[in-house]
Image: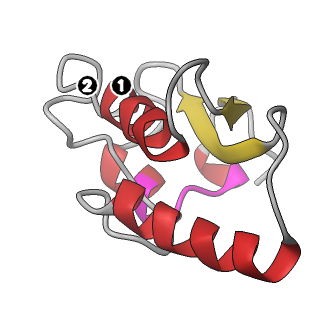
């Protein structure tokens, strides 16, 4: 079974939203943790431009809904961990891993 963690991201103290999200994305894409980026997957954005796209969307949101609060969540990171041999990287990235593919699945 995979472990999945949803991590809320906030603006770092003393930093802008742009700097905070860029720092978080850069940390998550660390080549030492992601097989040189091969394990990095994005949704509805280009991972190379994710922080810029995020800031554009954030600007639209703030224009429509008003100002921000210091405690606002500015994004989420989804982190998944799989037991060795449980799934192939390509299957996970393409979203083709199903419960029956897991040794503990119900398939």
Give the extent of the magenta segment: 93-99
| The stretch drawn in magenta includes residue 62 | no
Tag 1's secondary structure? helix
The structure residue drawn at horizontal position 36% and vertical position 43%, both measured from the top left corner, is 88
Mark carried by residue 27: 1
The structure residue drawn at horizontal position 80% and vertical position 34%, both measured from the top left corner, is 70
Q: Is residue 90 above or below residue 43?
A: above
- 73, 87: nearer the viewer: 73
Tell whether 82 sits left or right of 26: right
Tell whether 5 sits left or right of 34: right
The structure residue drawn at horizontal position 38% and vertical position 30%, both measured from the top left corner, is 23
Q: Is residue 65 above or below residue 12?
A: below
Residue 61: x %, y % from top left: 72, 74
Tell whether 32 sits left or right of 40: left
User: Is mark 2 in CB contact (under 8 Å) with mark 1?
Assistant: yes
- 7, 73: nearer the viewer: 73
Tag 2's secondary structure? loop
Query: How many discs mark residues in the rendered view?
Result: 2
In the picture of the structure, the residue carrying the numbered disc 2 is 30
The structure residue drawn at horizontal position 49% and vertical position 34%, both measured from the top left corner, is 20
Q: Is residue 107 above or below residue 14?
A: below
Tell whether 38 sits left or right of 86: left
| The stretch drawn in magenta includes residue 95 | yes
Residue 57: x %, y % from top left: 57, 73
CA neighbours of label 2 inside 10 A, class few (<14), some (14 to 19), many (20+): few
Mark carried by residue 87: none
- 79, 72: nearer the viewer: 72
Q: Quadrant of residue 65?
A: bottom right
């Amino acid at each position: 079974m995979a472990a999945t963690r949803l991590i809320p991201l906030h603006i770092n103290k003393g930093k802008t939203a742009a700097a905070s999200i860029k720092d978080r994305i850069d940390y998550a894409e660390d080549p030492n943790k992601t097989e040189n980026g091969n394990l990095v997957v994005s949704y509805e954005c280009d991972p190379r431009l994710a922080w810029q796209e995020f800031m554009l969307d954030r600007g639209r949101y703030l224009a429509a809904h008003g100002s921000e609060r210091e405690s606002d969540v500015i994004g989420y990171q989804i982190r998944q961990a799989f037991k060795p041999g449980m799934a192939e990287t390509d299957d996970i990235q393409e979203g083709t891993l199903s419960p029956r593919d897991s040794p503990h699945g119900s398939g």
